[in-house]
Amino acid sequence: GLATPMSVMVGVGKAAEAGVLIRNGESLQTASQITAMVLDKTGTITEGAPKVTDIRVVAGESEASVLGLAASLESGSEHPLAAAIVESARERNLQVGSVSRFNAVVGQGVEGELDGRHLLFGNEKLMAERQVDLGEFREQAQQLAAEAKTPMYLAVDQRLAAVIAVADPIKEDSVAAIKRLQQRGVRVIMLTGDNRATAEAIAHKVGIKEFVAEVKPEDKADKITALQAAGETVGMTGDGINDAPALAQANVGFAIGTGTDVAIESADITLMRGSLHGLADAIAVSRATLRNIKQNLFGAFIYNVVGVTFATGMLYPFFHVLLNPVVAGAAMAFSSVTVVTNANRLRLFKAQQH
């Protein structure tokens, strides 16, 4: 009865030492079987603190005026990219106006009215739907996307006014952490709402071969389900409210400890240090724990097989030997000591230094 719980208890403790908080023993054991790890981009692979990098305006407009309009519109949004626009405007001491009839178009952008003008701010899909001509700015946006930046278009009264690009710095240890996962045979997939060019540039930078771009928040859980239907045991890592359904759908959900409370509540495992190295650490501890459990079960099985063989007198006709009850009791106690000792060997386990 001690074989599994002792190993799980020690394994959970070792994971905690590495900054990985595991909710229960089932999650610890399932983590060892993960074949595919899905990573949300913003706040997971990247810092989650995007900055405005480029502002390109049409003739007759100024950087200050278009940034002020975009910030006024985005002040009603909770998206990280919106925060970058608003922060950039504040850094330049630009006035942020009050927008009426604000509307968030899921996965595309936002719209509203300011001083009698209709404003649109978002991706190429939004502009195409509203029939805004992008002209030469489409090519400029593609160039920005190839530099791992996220270009967004601002239109005023159905006329393009500017392209504003935002970039979210990649965490300094993301590349090494992703490589560790791949070395353990785990398939790594990135999900992002960015356009394909931006997604491809970021994936290339961090060494990820598979990615899904332009994913709407509500579709993330469906991507997890599709992988599970293909026979994968899926881990999902995210930090935001919109990651919660996908975290709950995954076989094991990993939440970045610096993320939202909703994401942490939906996850099975929390990475307290905010580093993706915690994923490889969790899987390594999980696999070591599972090996230890198997060793414990094997040891207990051998003790029981030998003990039962002697106790039932099966060997008496051949060797005229019966098992003394005192010896049987001692053997049982020694079996428990062996299991506990082997489980404590897990305390010697060390996650890879990083």
Image (spheres, grey):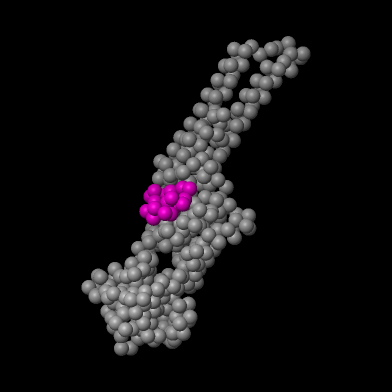
Instruction: In this rendered view, identify the residue nearer to me: 10 or 26.
Output: 26
> Does the magenta segment cover residue 256?
yes
Q: As drawn, is 154 to the left or to the right of 6?
A: left
The location of residue 44, given as percent across then percent down, is: 43, 58
The location of residue 85, given as percent across then percent down, is: 33, 71
Q: Residue at x 55, y 58 (%)?
A: 224
The location of residue 129, given as percent across then percent down, is: 48, 80
Q: Can residue 322 be seen?
A: yes
Q: Residue at x 47, y 72 (%)?
A: 195
In this picture, is 259 found above or below 100? above
Q: Can residue 201 be seen?
A: no
In this picture, is 89 found above or below 39? below
| Farthest residue, direction left | 93
In this picture, is 345 found above or below 31? above
In this picture, is 73 found above or below 13? below
Q: Residue at x 49, y 51 (%)?
A: 253
> Does the magenta segment cover residue 176?
no
Q: As drawn, is 86 to the left or to the right of 296?
A: left
Q: Residue at x 60, y 28 (%)?
A: 299
The location of residue 258, given as percent across then percent down, is: 37, 53
Specify start and end residues of the magenta stretch as a single range.
255-275
Q: Quadrant of the N terminus?
A: top right
Q: As drawn, is 242 to the left or to the right of 118?
A: right
| Farthest residue, direction front | 101
Q: How many numbered discs sit on the rendered protein?
A: 0
Q: As drawn, is 317 to the left or to the right of 121?
A: right
Instruction: In this rendered view, identify the residue nearer to me: 215 or 300.
Output: 215
